[in-house]
Image (spheres, rainbow, N blue to C red):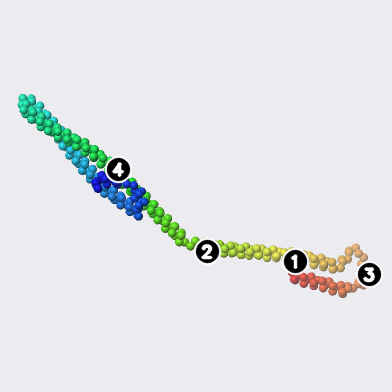
Amino acid sequence: MGLFDRIKRVVSSNLNDLVNKAEDPEKMLEQAILEMQEDLVQLRQGVAQAIAAQKRSEKQYNDAQNEINKWQRNAQLALQKGDENLARQALERKKTYTDTSTALKASLDTQSTQVDTLKRNLIQLESKISEAKTKKEMLRTRITTAKAQEQLQGMVRGMNTSSAMSAFERMEEKVLMQESRAQALGELAGADLESQFAQLEGSSDVDDELAALKAQMLPPATPQNQAQLPPQQETTAPNPKSNEVVDAELDSLRKQLDQL
């Protein structure tokens, strides 16, 4: 395969197709870059050789032009000296260099065109290599990301999510039970305190009722302005049965209070 054919193949190749067809895209792209760099080395050598040939042709053309000018002057000098034969020989030598110069000029024009084409191809290949290197780095990043995602997905698929969620649900249920027990204990403590205050209120009512009963059972007080009984008159003694009834009722009330 010729140099220019390889350059055309590399320049016109589709890197995306290489990536899609390769088993390992990164290695395939790296190989393509290596091939392009080898072509770049050969192309630079070809450009250098073409430029060197162009320089030689330019020198030969310039030398031919100098010879033409020299023999032109020699012909003029011979005519000035009256030597027409020598002047004719000088013009024949001039014609030889003129023909050489014409051929060199045509070759130089062709070489200049080839050198320009090679230079453009060299610039284009260098640009393609730079683009390929950039794509390779982008592809490497994408491959790394894809591998990480694939590994993460494998880890997620391998996780026993049902058991993990069941553990969380059990822990949540235990927390709810502890909160319920704490709330129940708080309510019981508040109820016990309220019952104590209710007992105090109940005791106060019983005491008030007991005091009222005692007041009812006491004999009425003697008024200050009531006349005193004669000393000789005796007061009536209290009825023993009435006292027993009161004591029995008092004992009953006490038992009721004790039971509260």
Asked if 170 appears above or below 108 in the picture, the reply is: below
Give the quarter of the figure containing the C terminus: bottom right
Q: Is residue 212 visible?
A: yes
Horizontal relation, residue 183 to residue 239: left or right: left
Identify which amino acid the numbered label 3 is placed on. Answer: Pro
Q: Which residue is mark 4?
A: 124
Q: Which residue is mark 3?
A: 230
N-term-proximal mark, 1 vs 4: 4
Q: Which residue is mark 1?
A: 203
Identify which amino acid the numbered label 1 is placed on. Answer: Ser
The CA span between labels 3 and 2 is: 100 Å
Look at 32% across and 52% down and name the residue there. Answer: 28
Of residue 176 and residue 248, the one placed in the foreground of this image is 176
Q: Which residue is mark 2?
A: 167
The CA span between labels 4 and 3 is: 154 Å
Which label lies toward us, 1 or 3? 1
Which label lies toward us, 3 or 2? 2
Look at 13% across and 30% down and name the residue there. Answer: 69
The CA span between labels 1 and 3 is: 46 Å
